[in-house]
Image (tube, rainbow, N blue to C red):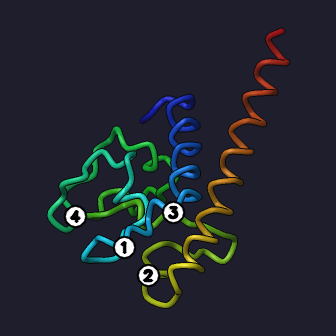
């Protein structure tokens, strides 16, 4: 698994990429896939789902039973209703998907930073 600091940095970069419109490239011939088409993807050249690397920072958030699927990051639960990218790609607009992912990223970043503050305070 990936180090906490690397995961936190990746979450922050992903939020920055999302908010800068990184998934809305009008020159692409297809819709961008969140996490898969990001700088963070450790298997960017997968032919529709080559095996995900154990170095993937998002693998931490994938339920154990889904980690061996071809594209595990599509199965990260993004909210309390259990929506995943896999389910949202079927029924939701790009705007709805981005809004859900944005909220998820902010929540995860806050959780990581909260734990880091507690760890720092406890060791001081």
Q: CA distance from mark 1 to mark 2?
A: 18 Å
In the displayed orientation, state which residue is furthest to the top.
124
Specify the label residue 49 is tagged with: 4
Upstream in the sequence, badge 1 or badge 2? 1
- Would you say the residues marked 3 and 2 are in contact, meaning their CB atoms lie under 8 Å apart? no
Q: CA distance from mark 3 to mark 2?
A: 18 Å
Upstream in the sequence, badge 1 or badge 4? 1
Q: CA distance from mark 4 to mark 2?
A: 16 Å
Residue 103: horizontal and vertical position, in percent?
A: 68, 63
In the displayed orientation, state which residue is furthest to the left.
47
Q: Secondary structure under badge 3?
A: loop
Q: CA distance from mark 4 to mark 3?
A: 24 Å
Residue positioned 42% across, 76% down in the render? 86
The residue identified by callout 2 is: 89
The residue identified by callout 1 is: 26
Upstream in the sequence, badge 4 or badge 2? 4
Residue positioned 19% across, 68% down in the render? 48
Q: Quadrant of the C terminus?
A: top right
Q: CA distance from mark 3 to mark 1?
A: 10 Å
- Would you say the residues marked 1 and 2 are in contact, meaning their CB atoms lie under 8 Å apart? no
Q: Is residue 28 left or right of residue 61?
A: left
The residue identified by callout 3 is: 21
Residue 56 or residue 24, whichever sits in front: 24
Residue 81: horizontal and vertical position, in percent?
A: 66, 77
């Amino acid at each position: 698994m990936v180090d906490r600091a690397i995961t936190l940095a990746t979450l922050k970069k992903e939020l920055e990429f999302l908010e800068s419109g990184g998934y809305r490239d009008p020159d692409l011939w297809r819709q961008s896939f969140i996490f898969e088409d990001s700088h963070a993807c450790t298997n960017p050249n997968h032919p529709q789902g080559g095996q995900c690397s154990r170095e993937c920072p998002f693998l931490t958030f994938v339920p154990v039973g889904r980690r061996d699927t071809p594209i595990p990051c599509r199965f990260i639960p993004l909210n309390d209703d259990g929506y995943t990218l896999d389910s949202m790609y079927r029924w939701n607009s790009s705007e709805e998907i981005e809004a859900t992912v944005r909220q998820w990223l902010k929540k995860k970043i806050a959780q990581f930073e909260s734990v880091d503050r507690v760890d720092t305070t406890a060791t001081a």
